[in-house]
Amino acid sequence: MTGRFVVLEGGDGSGKSTQRDLLVAWLQSSGIDAVATLEPGGSELGVSLRKLLLDGGAIAPRAEALLMAADRAQHIADVIRPALARGAWVVSDRHVPSSLVYQGVVRDLGVDAVGALSVFAADGLVPDLVVVLDVDDATAEERRSPGSDRMEREGDAFHEHVRRAYRTLAEAKGWTVIAGAGPPEAVAARLRAVVEPFVNAESAPS
Ligand code: TYD
């Protein structure tokens, strides 16, 4: 069996973690070894980095980008590559696209500069599929937990910018965008429709 690396993306309040868990449960119920994970915070070091990134005070944009990249490098080394090597699927709540959107566009460090940093951190690992959960501003504001971490405390304009940046970059980078509105089970069905060809490709005779 060949593992696949699937990344779920979207602004805060887009419902990624719920959809990641539903997708992993569905893969597992289809007899596929699948791992649910996240960035930042998917490794032991990453748990500490996540606390620094989200629970502390102000962080300079470049330091933020470097800490996200460090989290990613450790996550890949400790969790993602070992899972893929044993043939498991990995479904991650956020990865490189988050850095391109949040640090590259919204923090204005530049998509190319942050992209280069991400290439260094990822050391050749590229997702098989990136799916962006797109929700309108009103739905996202409703779902976003108010002020629970440093990023979530950013204002509405910041989060609207994030959602716009996802739409623009998705087109340029070939990420798949699906509607994230509606009941979780309806979104899960849309997501499965996107993922299913990868499952079938895996079981097809080579
Ligand atoms: P996450 O836990 O996914 O937040 P939420 O559940 O609210 O979507 O991600 C934490 C925050 O970190 C989120 O606001 C986005 C931000 N982030 C970046 O700015 N750059 C990155 O590279 C990553 C992975 C996350």
Image: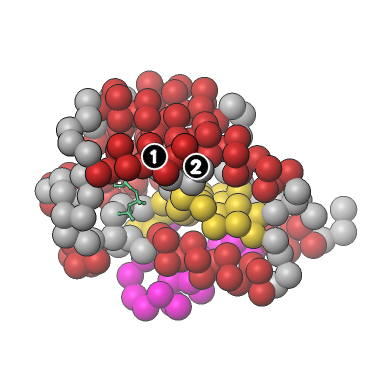
Residue shown at 45% from the left, 22% from the top = 116
| Picture quadrant where residue 192 is located | bottom right
Asked whether 184 falls inside the magenta stretch, the response is: yes
| Picture quadrant where residue 71 is located | top left
Q: Which residue is mark 2?
A: 44
Quadrant of the frame with the N terminus: bottom right
Mark 2 closeness class: few <14, some 14–19, many ≥20 residues within 10 Å? few
Judge from the rendering whether residue 186 lies leftward or rightward of residue 60; answer left or right.
right
Secondary structure state at the residue bearing disc 2? helix
Residue lying at the far right in this picture: please name it: 206
Number of on-image labels: 2
Asked whether 181 falls inside the magenta stretch, the response is: yes
In percent of width and height, residue 77 lies at 60, 35
Height in image: 180 above or below 176? below
| Mark linked to residue 26 | none
Residue shown at 65% from the left, 55% from the top = 89
Residue nearest the viewer, comparing 175 with 47: 47
Magenta range is 176-196
Q: Which residue is mark 1?
A: 48
**Residue type, mark 2 in image:** Glu
Judge from the rendering whether residue 48 lies leftward or rightward of residue 106; answer left or right.
right
**Residue type, mark 1 in image:** Ser
Residue shown at 22% from the left, 25% from the top = 60
